[in-house]
Image: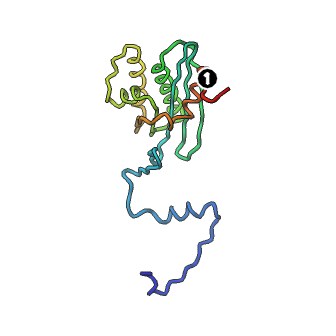
Amino acid sequence: MALSEFNLQYVPQKAAKCQALADFLAHHPLPYSFRGNDIKIGMVETRNNYWTMYFDGSSTSSSAGAGIVIQSPHHDRWYFSLKLDFDCTNNQAEYEALIIGLGILHDLRVTHALIFDDSELVINQLNGSFRCMSCTLAPYHMVVSCLAESFDGITFEHIFQIHNTDADEFAQIASGAQLLGAS
């Protein structure tokens, strides 16, 4: 309405339908900026050029496994399910999954990563909220800390298990655990 006093003529730009939205956003940047190019989408925070990794570990009386889901900034996804061939606790399996996942990100030359898991213990140890007092987890914590230093930006975030189902299922499959609802 405010522009109706001017003699403006609308001429649609010709573009391929799949490219029209991308072209519009590229030519019309937002007048305000998000904190450091951050955008909140549901429960997950994504950042430009950040890769996302979800991980989980599973330990049963007979086996252990790791599940990892890696997502690129372009939303390509890779799923990993690995059987651990040694006895370990559930928390050790969590750390094993994290170390393997960080190794994959490092091999992909990722510099910025958002890491998500449903283990409050592991995430809070990595964020410094909890001290790692366990002599069985301390070596894992030290390896993860060293690996994390190779990234320019890395964030460890706790999420609820409902938001980590893919990594959880892949970890359970690798450990041979019976999935809920499976016959």
Q: Position of residue 157 (x, y in %)?
A: 41, 36
Q: Establish if 180 lies above or below 12.
A: above
In the displayed image of the protein, which residue is found farthest to the right?
183
For the point 36% across and 16% down, the residue is: 134
Circle count: 1
Q: Establish if 20 lies above or below 152.
A: below
Q: Position of residue 114 (x, y in %)?
A: 45, 39
Q: Position of residue 16 (x, y in %)?
A: 65, 64
Q: Establish if 155 lies above or below 171.
A: below
Toward the viewer: 52 or 41? 41
Secondary structure at numbered mark 1: loop
Crowding at mark 1 (Cα within 10 Å: few <14, some 14-19, many 20+): few
Toward the viewer: 56 or 15? 56
Q: Position of residue 107 (x, y in %)?
A: 53, 31
Q: Quadrant of residue 170?
A: top right
Q: Which residue is mark 1?
A: 178
The quadrant the C terminus occupies is: top right
Tell whether 165 sits left or right of 132. Answer: right
Color encoding of the figure? rainbow
Tell whether 151 sits left or right of 86. Answer: left
For the point 39% across and 54% down, the residue is: 34
Tell whether 153 sits left or right of 60. Answer: left
For the point 49% across and 37% down, the residue is: 110
- Amino acid type at mark 1: Gln
Toward the viewer: 99 or 133? 133
The quadrant the N terminus occupies is: bottom left
Q: Quadrant of residue 112?
A: top left
